[in-house]
Image (cartoon, rainbow, N blue to C red):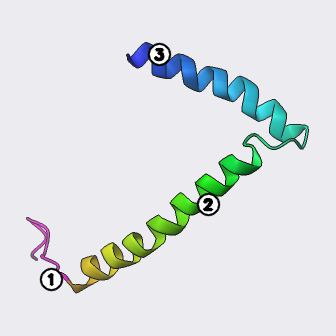
Amino acid sequence: MLACVALALVVMALVAVPARRAGRDVLSERGEEVLGSIRDRQRPSRSARDAEHEALPHEEPVGASA
């Protein structure tokens, strides 16, 4: 399975990099819309996660006391 993923990444790189250099879009218009909607849905969850992380008390690392 790992070999298949590696092969897929190589093929994507061989297709996407030259397309970008030539000024062509890699994704279709519909693909860009889907990607944009995914990013929009992730923004609120990232903001909430960051706010939650800031609200948690931070402990001193072990061995950090002087």
Which of discs 3 and 1 lies nearer the camera? The answer is: 3
> What span is colored magenta in the figure?
56-66
Q: Which mark is residue 16?
A: none
Q: Secondary structure at mark 3?
A: helix
Marks 2, 1: nearer the viewer:
2
Residue type, label 3: Cys
Q: Nearer the viewer, residue 27 or 18?
A: 27
Which residue corresponds to mark 1?
57
Is residue 35 rendered to the left or right of residue 22?
A: left
Q: Looking at the rendered structure, which numbered label has been put on residue 36?
A: 2
Residue 30 spot, x, y in % from top left: 70, 49
Residue plotted at (31% across, 73% down) = 49
Residue 29 versus residue 45 in the image, above or below: above
> Horizontal and vertical percent for residue 34?
60, 53
Quadrant in which the N terminus is drawn: top left
Q: Residues within 10 Å of mark 2 (few under 14, many from 20)?
A: few
Q: Could you tell me how far apart the alpha carbons at marks 2 and 1 are, in whole angstroms?
A: 34 Å
Q: Quadrant of residue 20?
A: top right
Disc nearest the viewer among 2 and 3: 2
